[in-house]
Image: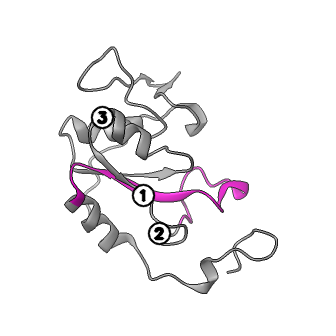
Amino acid sequence: GAVIVGKTNVPALCLDVQTFNPLHGVTVNPFDPARTPGGSSGGSAAAVAAGMTSLAVGSDLQGSLRLPAAFCGVWAIKPSRGRIPTHGHVPEVRCLQNTLTVGAVGDSPAALDAFMTAACRPPSDEDEPGPDGEPAG
């Protein structure tokens, strides 16, 4: 099992390369407050880099985990689509489901390996898109 430590900040609509939203303000890079931790999972990467947790779960569409990890000097993984179910994940936007994947930011490759071992399911033919681009399953 996992212990939920807390929630982290994301940009409005989870669509930006920095982490600011009007409700919670700006998240700064823990190594240099004048710099961004990236986005959209900048809050997750900043929390891992600051040592608040060793792992944070998030989603990746076009670098939303990998960019903040690089900005904060930690590790990230974007699994192949379908390896981790996205059902119930926020944001659940139907048109993005063919590219959105659930992944993680971690303080080491070992943390990401533990996450993948716990969260992944075996690949299935149902994960492959049908002729219209929508998941076949």
Inspect the image, locate mark 3, and give the three-letter code of the amino acid beneath it.
Answer: Cys
Q: CA distance from mark 1 to mark 2?
A: 8 Å
Identify the residue position indicated by label 1 in the image: 103
Q: Is residue 94 magenta?
A: yes
Q: Upstream in the sequence, badge 1 or badge 3? A: 3
Question: Which residue is nearer to you in this view: 129 or 5?
Answer: 129
Q: Upstream in the sequence, badge 2 or badge 3? A: 3
Residue most extreme to the top:
34
Is 27 above or below relative to 10? above
Using the rendered image of the protein, determine whether residue 8 is visible from the camera's viewpoint.
no
**Circle 3 crowding by C-alpha within 10 Å: few under 14, some 14–19, many from 20:** many
The numbered disc on residue 42 is none
Question: Which residue is nearer to you in this view: 75 or 30?
Answer: 75
Inspect the image, locate mark 1, and give the three-letter code of the amino acid beneath it.
Answer: Gly
Helix, strand or loop under label 3: helix
User: Which quarter of the figure is the N terminus placed in?
Assistant: bottom left
Identify the residue position indicated by label 2 in the image: 84
Give the label, 2 or 3, closer to the camera.
3
Inspect the image, locate mark 2, and give the three-letter code of the amino acid beneath it.
Answer: Ile
What segment is highlighted magenta in the picture? 86-109
Identify the residue position indicated by label 3 in the image: 72
x and y, in percent, of residue 35 in the image: 36, 19
